[in-house]
Every structure is written in structure tokens, then in C-alpha cells.
Image (spheres, coloured by chain):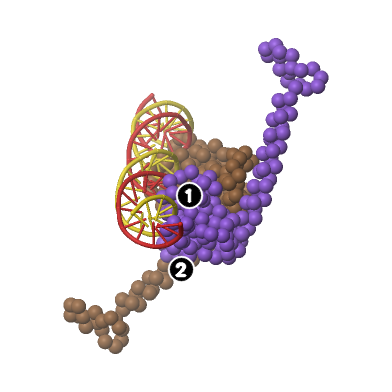
Chain colours: A purple, B brown, C yellow, D red
DNA sequence: CTATATCCTAGTTGGCAAGTCGGAATAAGC
DNA sequence: GCTTATTCCGACTTGCCAACTAGGATATAG
């Protein structure tokens, strides 16, 4: 439940890439999709980045050697505004859309649950407000490091299990595998 | 973004109704859909309540005068378990499904955002854990009271605006409406 | 003037939430 | 025992919208 759409997924990954190259030359969509493993027609990414640009979080340069860069520093970009630009207002329920005051909820029964959805909305909103793009970049890079360690550990493990033991080597025979 | 499906919406309303009648005789679906304004074929509600029953939150009595009642007291029922029964695990992203440990996330890039979705998931989960069905019922009833006051205020307001003023009454004539 | 980009509007489509169908099982009241 | 009210169940249909595509215009570097 409460799934985020692919717009949110890809868009955030894209922003992480831009953050990683903050200060550099602009990044083209071709470059981004390759680097971040977004194997899509670029035209879909164009749509996403357009929303981000229209909300003033990304600047673009057209023509050859063009591309996108962040319009603000990663510290100034909160995940809440990024995701709102990509996916619209946080609204677990129609009657709990942020910004709008419960005009829709005339029904007595409908409101029996309004309190619940409002709480969920506020919790999500507060969480996303508290995380900046800079935070995410930091976490992403350390996660990347951890992943690399794990990957090499798996490689070692593979070597160990493939290497025959010193004592008795596995004695052929079908079904000879021991359970203990 | 982060919308709750109609299963969640209707299911919670249904549970609020059962909570309101905790201790009484069982409530039939016909009764519930009328009382809570769920104007649907009952067969859809049957599906929802079935999930709730299979998760041991609701007991059923078959046959005439049958229906459903809560299997535990409203204080013991957390919104988190209710919604999980109705909509499955909280998972803003596939790689952030609660309960499962990030086996899926082998990709270095995919994990750049894992941190974010995990935080969102935990925030939602904590919020829903902290609210019981009893809390919701209490809020629902007070909201209902507020709504009734507001409704009568609107009725009064309507009377006031419809009542001709002491000075000049609106002077007929087609297109004679004044802008100021 | 060509290659590489962003920019924009308007399609198309596949999957799945949402809702439907038909019928079996169970119990109360007459 | 018949009728009526209800839960129970698996399988089917449908409508919608996120997700993606098509096609072309516009801008800029070399």
C-alpha cells in the first residue's frame, strides 16, 4: 500500500545524479540514464525533468553540450518539494489533500476517517521535509560503498565454497549429501 | 501521491461502524452500507470483510440475523494491522517493503534512494501503529458533532442572506444585477 | 549545416484496482 | 421443510490512468 509511482522513483534518481554533479557542466539525459541505470526512452525522462524545471529546481541548457543542472544547492532542496513536483500533492485520500481545506468533506460519514488520513499525510510530509537532497546523496554514496564491500564478500564466499576442502573431498555417489 | 485504495477507504469505514456497535448483535453488510453511506454492491464489501476476518479481526455469524462483529476490542485494534489486512504491506517502493530485508536491492543505483523510501515507510508505519480503532471512533464522533454544528450554522446563514434587507429590496429588472 | 540537445502536444497501451456474477452453505422463523 | 436472510467463495469483466511512445519544433556548438 501507499506506493510511489515511477515518476517519483526515476525523478529522485535523476536528482541524485544532478546533485552528485552539482557545480559541473550540465548533464544530458543520455548521460543520466546511462549512469543511473534508467533504461528508458529519454522522452519519459524529459517529462519528469520538465516538471522539475517548471518548479524551478532544475535549469536547462539547450543545444549541443546542453543538459540539466540543479537550480539550487542540494542542501536547499527538500525531498518534499521534489516529490510534490513529480507526483503532485501528498494526498492519501481525496479529502486529505494537503493545501486544500476540507471543503469536499460535507458527508458526516466521510469525515469519520478524515482524521486518520490527515495524520498519515502529515507524517509523510514531515518526513520528506526533513530530508534534503544533500542528505540523500550522502546516504546514497555510503550505501554504495557498503554494497561494494558486500559484493566483494560474496565473491570471496563463492571462491571458498568452490574450493575443495583439505580433509576428505566430496565422495561422488548420487544422493550422498549429508544433512548434519 | 501516496494514495490509499478504496479497499482501505471502505474497509476502515466498515471497521468504524463495527467499533461503534461493539458489544451489540452482529451487523449485516446491508445495515453497514446503509449506515455508513457505502452505496455499493455488497459483494465488494464481502471481499473486504473477508480479508479482515481471515486476519482474525472480525468474526462472522451466518444465516438470518447474522453479520459481523469485532473479534477484539477497538482499543486492541491498531490501524496498521487493519490497513495491512486490507491493502497488504506498507511499501512505497518495491525495494522498501516492510518485513522483507532488502534482498532485491542488488543494484548500486537502486539503493541510492532506498534510504528515502525506508524512512517514508517507517513514518507511515509508526503513525498507523499509534492510532487504534478506539481513537478513530472517538475522533469520528466528535468530528460528526462539529459537522452538525457547522451544518446548522450554514442553514442560519442561508436564512440571513435570503431575508430581504431593511433598506432597499432588490429592484427586479432583467440584467439589473450590480457588480459592486 | 550537421550533430546533439532540450522542448512540447498528443497519442496509445497494459496492468490492475474496482467492481460483478452466479451459486453454494448456513441459520432463524414460521 | 420451506422461505428468507445472510455469509461465503472463486472466477470473471471493465474502466481508468500511470507509463510509455510518436513525431516534430527549436536551440546551440563546432
Q: What secondary structure is found at the residue carrying circle 2?
A: helix
Q: Identify residue for label 2.
A: B149
Few, some or many C-alpha atoms within 10 Å of disc 1 (few <14, some 14-19, many ≥20)?
Answer: some
Determine the residue positioned at 67% across, 50% down.
Answer: A142
Q: What secondary structure is found at the residue carrying circle 1?
A: helix
Q: Which chain does the residue under circle 1 lie in?
A: A
Q: Position of residue B8 (x, y in %)?
A: 49, 48
Residue A108 horizontal side relative to residue B113, left or right = left
Quarter residue A94 falls in: bottom left
Compared to A131, does D6 lie above or below?
above
Q: Quadrant of the C terminus of chain B?
A: bottom left
Q: Identify residue for label 1.
A: A30
Determine the residue positioned at 55% across, 65% down.
Answer: A72
Few, some or many C-alpha atoms within 10 Å of disc 2 (few <14, some 14-19, many ≥20)?
Answer: few
Residue A23 horizontal side relative to residue A177, left or right = left
Query: What is the CA distance from the residue labelled 1 to the residue labelled 2?
Result: 59 Å
Q: Give the numbered dot on residue A88.
A: none
Q: Say which of A145 and A60 sits in front.
A: A60
Quarter residue A131 falls in: bottom right
Amino acid at each position: 500500500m501507499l506506493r510511489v509511482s515511477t515518476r517519483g522513483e526515476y525523478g529522485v534518481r535523476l536528482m541524485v545524479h544532478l546533485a552528485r554533479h552539482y557545480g559541473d557542466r550540465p548533464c544530458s539525459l543520455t548521460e543520466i540514464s546511462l549512469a543511473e541505470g534508467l533504461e528508458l526512452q529519454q522522452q519519459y525522462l524529459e517529462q519528469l525533468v520538465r516538471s522539475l524545471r517548471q518548479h524551478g529546481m532544475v535549469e536547462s541548457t539547450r543545444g549541443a553540450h546542453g543538459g540539466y543542472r540543479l537550480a539550487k544547492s542540494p542542501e536547499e532542496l527538500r525531498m518534499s518539494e521534489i516529490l510534490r513536483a513529480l507526483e503532485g500533492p501528498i494526498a492519501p485520500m481525496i479529502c486529505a489533500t494537503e493545501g486544500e481545506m476540507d471543503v469536499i468533506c460535507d458527508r458526516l460519514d466521510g469525515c469519520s476517517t478524515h482524521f486518520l488520513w490527515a495524520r498519515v499525510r502529515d507524517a509523510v510530509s514531515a518526513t520528506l521535509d526533513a530530508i534534503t537532497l544533500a542528505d540523500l546523496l550522502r546516504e546514497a554514496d555510503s550505501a554504495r560503498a557498503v554494497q561494494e564491500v558486500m559484493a566483494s564478500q560474496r565473491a570471496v564466499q563463492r571462491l571458498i565454497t568452490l574450493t575443495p576442502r583439505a580433509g576428505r573431498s566430496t565422495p561422488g555417489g548420487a544422493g550422498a549429501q549429508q544433512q548434519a
